[in-house]
Amino acid sequence: MQTDVRKNVSVHYVIIRSLRKVPCLQESWEETPMNKEIIFSMNTAFRGEFNIHGYSYGRGDKAACIVGSMRGNEYQQLYMCSLLAQRLAEIEAQGDVVAGKEILLIPTLNYSSMNAEKKKWISDDSDINRSFPGNIEGTATSRIAATLMDRVKDYTYGIQFASFYLQGISIPHVRMMETGTESTSLANLFGMPYVLTGDTRSFDTATLNYNWQKTGTQAFSVYSATTDTLDGESAKMAVSAVLRFLTRMGIIRYESHGGYISTTLKEKDLVSVRADEAGFFRCIVGVNQEVKRGQVLAEIINPMDGNIKAEVLAPTDGIVFFVQNSPLVFQNVVIYKIVRRMHQ
């Protein structure tokens, strides 16, 4: 098992490296190689050496850091990092990372759980993104958080490819915590459909985004449509948004379309729709579709006899921001979130 896991990880990084070796850019690749470093390393009881790698592009001031998957089910977030690694490699090879600027990409903090098909840390089921700022003398996830925080705290901009806290599909967006240091005007420069702001909850204080902001980094969480399945279109949208932001902040030179004029929302203003019954979930209206109050969004089916137990109705006019994608739903769980349409 140990050999297989390490082999899988090695293959992953070979793939990222190979994306840099575009034939027409081979000479530039040799002149401006991507720097690879070990961010964190430790020996594990059953899986041998565990290393977290970082890849830097350009040299100079710590301009921007992008962090990918922290949990073992964040396949989409790691996939977005692989796409971003490819584009940054080409940009660097063309000499289009602005002189005196450095970008650091850390694709994953938890590939062991991903290989074992577990969401959280294998040994104790802890969550890396609930372990910040961390303790270098603490548990494994706390040591990872402390080491990462020390490495990334001085970057001007911090971007995390985050996963939505509910299982399902959402409209791609940028989220910022309301810590007093957030800037929605900067978040608008990603050109994503929505910028979402949210109150800081007690558990948020143990996240990377919050601790980044507290150390002076302008931190953003970028969400695509999915988490545990790959969605190519929304992944490309998120990567384009990051490249657009880096361009607008004078870190890279990159030609991209202008993106969306973002709508800024408070997270608490999204209307939650809960299931009145438990059963099979038959989705009728999907994400990013307009709905009218009283419209049927979904049906909940009795798993035994196939009869409709309940219809899920839209409580307001608006746009579907999130819909759950599990085949079964339980009573009183959130199955939709709707952006309320404001009438003039």
Image (cartoon, grey):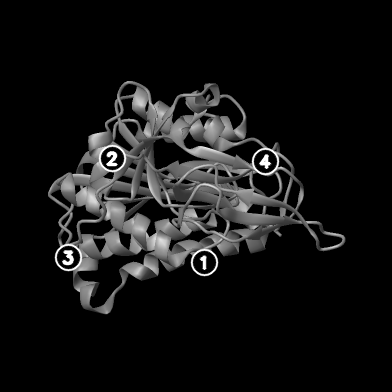
Type of the residue with mark 1: Val
**Residue under pointer 3:** 94
Q: Residue at x 52, y 44 (%)?
A: 337
Q: CA distance from mark 4 to mark 2?
A: 30 Å
Mark in the foreground, 3 or 4: 4
First in residue order: circle 1 vs circle 2: 1
**Residue under pointer 2:** 187
Tell me whether the residue at label 1 lies in contact with that at label 4, contact meaning CB atoms closer than 8 angstroms.
Answer: no
Residue 333 - label: 4
Farthest residue toward the bottom?
23
Mark in the foreground, 1 or 2: 2
Q: Residue at x 17, y 65 (%)?
A: 94
First in residue order: circle 1 vs circle 4: 1
First in residue order: circle 3 vs circle 4: 3
- 328 versus 330 height, above or below: below
Q: CA distance from mark 1 to mark 2?
A: 35 Å
- 303 versus 340 height, above or below: below
First in residue order: circle 3 vs circle 1: 1
